[in-house]
């Protein structure tokens, strides 16, 4: 069987415990996992961390897993996936809102590139309530993000 490379794309601003769990689950069935930070220059201003910081934190979180690497991309996800030889996009779906969004994206990506499949996974129930948006909000209002993000992220936000 040829080796399988999966992509876990997202904004990861910042990476959460839910993301970490999803990526580690993807690494159980894929030989290589690319955690891909998608960005466009126009989105940059509203974010918490710049793209380089997001990628560095992802590298830190998965430093124990040689099969998981971090990268950033601009433009279409399917173009990046094709460039990196990835045949599978893995995304988490927490509820109906995610489902509607991811279903449309999955179908659009399939329209653009039939050879790349999308796999939607339910979250681990410990993490279904976590989103980067809420983490940013809690952080900006002075709350603790411990238990929501990997230790490396909590440290970075505290410092
Ligand atoms: O889950 P997120 O954080 O909203 O992830 C967003 C991301 C980066 C995965 C998504 O916006 C994306 O794939 N952007 C690249 C542009 C693209 O390929 N769009 C899909 C065609 S409609």
Image (tube, helix red, strand yellow):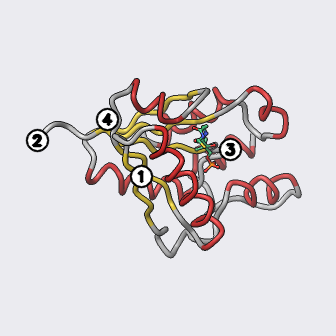
Of the numbered discs 2 and 4, the one sitting upstream in the chain is: 2
**Which numbered marker is on residue 94?**
none
Of the numbered discs 1 and 2, the one sitting upstream in the chain is: 2
- The CA span between labels 1 and 4 is 23 Å
**Which numbered marker is on residue 118?**
1
> Which residue does the image show at 43% across and 64% down from the upper left?
121
> Which residue does the image show at 61% across and 55% down from the upper left?
149
Name the residue carrying label 4.
Answer: 66
- The CA span between labels 3 and 4 is 23 Å
Mark 3 lies within 8 Å of ligand 1 (Cβ measured): yes
- The CA span between labels 1 and 2 is 20 Å
Q: Secondary structure at mark 2?
A: loop
Q: Nearer the viewer, residue 54 or 144?
A: 54
Q: Residues within 10 Å of mark 2 (few under 14, many from 20)?
A: few
* Image depth: mark 1 or mark 4 in front: 1
Of the numbered discs 2 and 3, the one sitting upstream in the chain is: 2
Name the quadrant of the N terminus: top left
Name the residue carrying label 3.
Answer: 13
- In the displayed image of the protein, which residue is found farthest to the left? 1
């Amino acid at each position: 069987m040829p080796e399988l490379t999966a992509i876990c794309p997202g904004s990861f601003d910042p990476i959460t415990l839910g993301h970490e769990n999803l990526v580690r689950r993807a690494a159980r069935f894929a030989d290589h996992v690319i955690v891909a930070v998608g960005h466009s220059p126009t989105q940059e201003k509203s974010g918490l961390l710049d793209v380089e910081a997001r990628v560095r934190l992802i590298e830190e979180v998965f430093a124990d897993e040689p099969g998981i690497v971090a990268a950033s991309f601009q433009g279409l996800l399917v173009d990046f996936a094709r460039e990196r030889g990835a045949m599978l996009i893995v995304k988490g779906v927490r509820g109906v809102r995610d489902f509607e969004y991811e279903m449309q994206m999955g179908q659009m990506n399939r329209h653009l590139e039939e050879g790349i499949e999308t796999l939607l996974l339910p979250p681990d129930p410990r993490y279904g309530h976590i989103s980067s948006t809420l983490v940013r909000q809690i952080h900006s209002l002075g709350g603790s993000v411990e238990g929501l993000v990997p230790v490396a992220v909590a440290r970075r936000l505290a410092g």
